Image (cartoon, grey):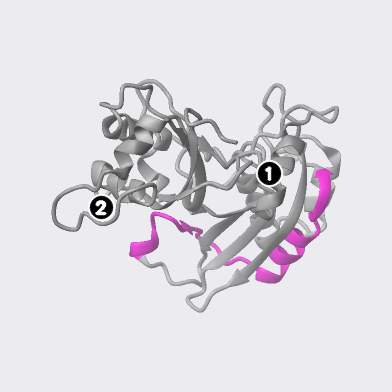
Amino acid sequence: MTSPDAPTRVRLDLAYDGTDFTGWARQPGLRTVQGVLEEALATLFGRSGVEPPRLTVAGRTDVGVHAIGQVAHLDLAPEQLAGLERRPRGRGAGAAGIPSLARRLNGIVGQAADVQILRASAAPPGFDARFSAVWRRYEYRIADAEALRDPRARGYTLWHPASLKLGAMDAAARSLLGLHDFAAYCRPREGSTTIRTLQEFGWRREEDGVLVAHVRADAFCHSMVRSLVGACVAAGEGRYAPARVAGIRDEAQRTSEFIVMPARGLTLVEVGYPPDAELAARAEQTRAKRGLPDRAPID
């Protein structure tokens, strides 16, 4: 039986435009997504008499990276949960309880702010936004010389001056699939492994000509997606054959044969979780070292 003093875990689904954020993680003196949201939580729960809740996120996105499918969790003390149960007054007040947390936080950060809570819901038992996740999916958008360069989309689409060959880029991407050491495509971080399972990676050209990469993996190391995209762009420019990107991976060494692409074109689209009954086991499995350092999701 759950203790009446036990905290209640809440899942947040959120989106943000990363342009004016210094990444997700709170940093002193810098504007970050976590910092803005935790300040809003402190404002909301400032009179509860307990410490404001902290956020745990599925993937700590880097400077300038966007998200439309980010997931985080927080734990609410009974006093904080009771505050949400009180129905707010005023026009458009809506329902009380955990679902009202999204509207309340959006009201604090601003309805037209560059970060928005899409949903707030009671988390199933065993849920951990970071460790229960089984995959993360990103998209990267490039408007090359053949695409419509829509100024309205310039904040989340990279404009590339040359024409790119879709077939070469897609072949390069698909050659990288599977469980491998992606050290050649990651910025090294002490204590972190570069072994990842790349589950999906391919390219398509949309009706307006914009090239879109879809990339899914169990987790990503630092700058991995933007490095993979850079390697495909080099293949699309004809600088090397598509098969070369797998050769670079297998050499496991950083190289100057391609550039890491800018963050502007990158968006975290979705985070996948197992069925509710498997959430706790998945979190425990992910935390286990299994002879390797922690696999922290980040790009």
Could you tell me if the residues under marks 2 and 1 are in contact, i.e. CB atoms within 8 Å?
no
The magenta segment:
151-180
Query: Measured along the vertical axis of the image, is residue 240 above or below residue 164?
Result: above
Residue drawn at the location 64% of the way across and 41% of the way down? 126
Residue drawn at the location 68% of the way across and 46% of the way down? 279
Residue drawn at the location 43% of the way across and 72% of the way down? 148
Q: Confirm whether residue 48 shows in the render.
A: yes
Residue density around tag 2, few if under 14, some if 14–19, many if 20 or more, within 10 Å: few
Q: Is residue 141 left or right of residue 291?
A: left
**Tag 1 secondary structure:** loop
Given the image, on which type of amino acid does mark 1 rest?
Ala
Query: Measured along the vertical axis of the image, is residue 88 above or below residue 240?
Result: above
Q: Is residue 121 left or right of residue 95?
A: right
Q: Quadrant of the C terminus?
A: top right
Q: Is tag 2's residue or tag 1's residue first in the polypeptide sequence?
A: 2
Count of numbered circles on the image: 2
Of 64 and 230, the residue lying toward us? 64
